[in-house]
Image (spheres, rainbow, N blue to C red):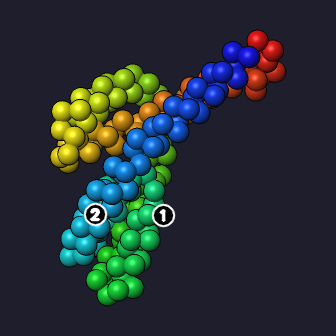
Amino acid sequence: MLILLNILSGVALLVWARILSGPASCGSSARSCSSVLGRSANSRFRAFGAGLCVTSLVESSNVIAVLASSFAAQGLLPLAPELAIMLGADVGTALMSRVLTLDLSWLSPTLLLGGVIAFLSFKQTRTGQMGRTIIGLLILLALHLIVEAAQPVMQGEGGA
């Protein structure tokens, strides 16, 4: 019973973190991503860097691919920088998946505390919204809790 309660609490934390970080990651960062991607049209290397950085922050190369291809379809972005953005997005996804496999458990509480302080101190500013996004790292903490709670079930030790 305790195992089920731990799994459900991890799922509840995951849902709460997603609700909390949702408006911050969808609203202001979508406009920021669009402006960063739009300004990177001058150079392929700059476009690659923009795709890499924005994907690392948004953690979704699909979003960047849709933005870049819609800019290219509207004639706002030439084809070569658009392809460089998409390549940067793919590399950013690969790098983030590598970073997320590292043991950063020591960093979670620090980032969480910093995010809460930034959000509570500067609610309606860009710093506050970044704090809200950092609080979204609770998603990673929640996933870790779910995996930890499910270990006894996966090893056949259930029954507590």
Viewer can see residue 80: no
Query: Going 63% across and 21% down the picture, which residue do you hit?
Result: 6
Q: Dot 2: what SS?
A: helix
Residue on which disc 1 sits = 62
Question: Is residue 4 shown above or below 56?
Answer: above
Q: Which mark is residue 73?
A: none
61 or 30, which lies in front? 30
| Count of number-bearing discs | 2
Looking at the image, is mark 1 or mark 2 earlier in the sequence?
A: 2
Residue 36: where, in percent of width, then height?
24, 64
C-alpha separation, residue under disc 1 versus residue under disc 2: 16 Å
Q: Dot 1: what SS?
A: helix
Question: Is residue 149 shown above or below 126?
Answer: above
Query: Going 45% across and 43% down the picture, which residue do you hit?
Result: 19
Query: Going 24% across and 29% down the picture, which residue do you hit?
Result: 117
Residue on which disc 2 sits = 31
Residue 17, picture quadrant: top left
Mark 2: amino acid: Arg
Residue 144, picture quadrant: top right
Question: Is residue 138 shown above or below 6?
Answer: below
